[in-house]
Amino acid sequence: MTTLIHRLKQIRAYIQTAEITYHRQPNSVLLLAVSKTKPATMIAEAYQAGQRHFGENYLQEALSKQQALGAFDITWHFIGPIQSNKTKAIANHFDWVHSVDNLKTARRLSKQRPPHLAPLNICLQVNISDEASKSGIHLHELADLCEQVAILPNIKLRGVMAIPAPSFSFEQQCQPYKILYQAVKSLNKPELDTFSFGMSDDLNAAITEGATMVRIGTALFGARQ
Ligand SMILES: *Cc1c(COP(=O)(O)O)cnc(C)c1O
């Protein structure tokens, strides 16, 4: 077995164990394999082992991998910062976008999503730790932006994505996810069913606080250059 397949199995087992430990439904946490900077051959290898959801941050890099992997039935997620001049390609070539943090971007994606494709699934990125350097809306902007995005055609608002500031105790890792989860639940919109929470270093905290998708790069594909 290769290192990648070994890690993939380990992460699946880890997620399953966390689902049990934290009283989550079996298979309620989807593994999103974050393949940025990694070659298409690694994506193909994970695909052969059953992985279907892949996340990319850089448009040009993603498009060339998509072309190489055209025959594969992959669900592509865009998770990186979005420049206005990239929305058209994103709207055409992805199934999900996790990093929407303003109305203008949402409107462009809506307008540019080809109507013959299924609606583009959208998560709003929330800067839950209020870090000046991070993308994402502030928590207090969430309710209004949800209202405005939910009505746009050709896209489907599904939930939120967060990348909290690193913290090293389990309780500290949980806190921001707990706050954001409650904020979304308080909006009373059952269609907001997606919590894109958790990366290689805070999986357990994310899963205990309601993650439905965990975005794993390093722990799966190894360190990036
Ligand atoms: C790179 C990236 C990840 C994966 O991070 P790892 O620490 O490598 O698991 C997850 N989410 C986003 C938004 C990323 O940019």
Image (tube, rainbow, N blue to C red):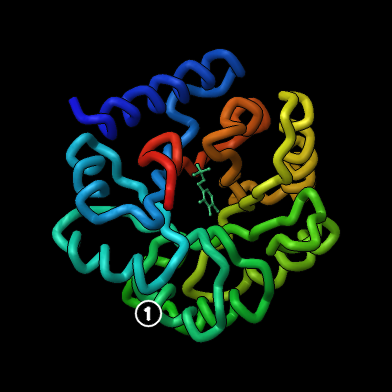
- Give the x, y percent position of residue 109: 51, 77
Residue type, mark 1 in image: Pro
Left or right? Give the position of 147 relative to 13: right
Q: Kindly identify which residue carries mark 1.
A: 114
Left or right? Give the position of 200 relative to 224: right
Residue 60 lies, with reference to residue 188, above or below; the image says below
Residue drawn at x 32%, y 76% as measured from the top left: 116
- Mark 1 Cα shell of 10 Å, populated few (<14), some (14-19), many (≥20): some
Furthest residue to the right?
Answer: 140
- Give the x, y percent position of residue 39: 27, 55
Q: Nearer the viewer, residue 118 or 140?
A: 140
The answer to which quarter of the image holds residue 11 is: top left
Residue 214 lies, with reference to residue 112, above or below; the image says above
* Quadrant, the N terminus: top left
The answer to which quarter of the image holds residue 220 is: top left
Q: Nearer the viewer, residue 151 or 124?
A: 124
The answer to which quarter of the image holds residue 140 is: bottom right
- Give the x, y percent position of residue 138: 80, 60
Left or right? Give the position of 215 relative to 102: left
Residue 172 lies, with reference to residue 216, above or below; the image says above
Residue drawn at x 48%, y 31% as measured from the top left: 28
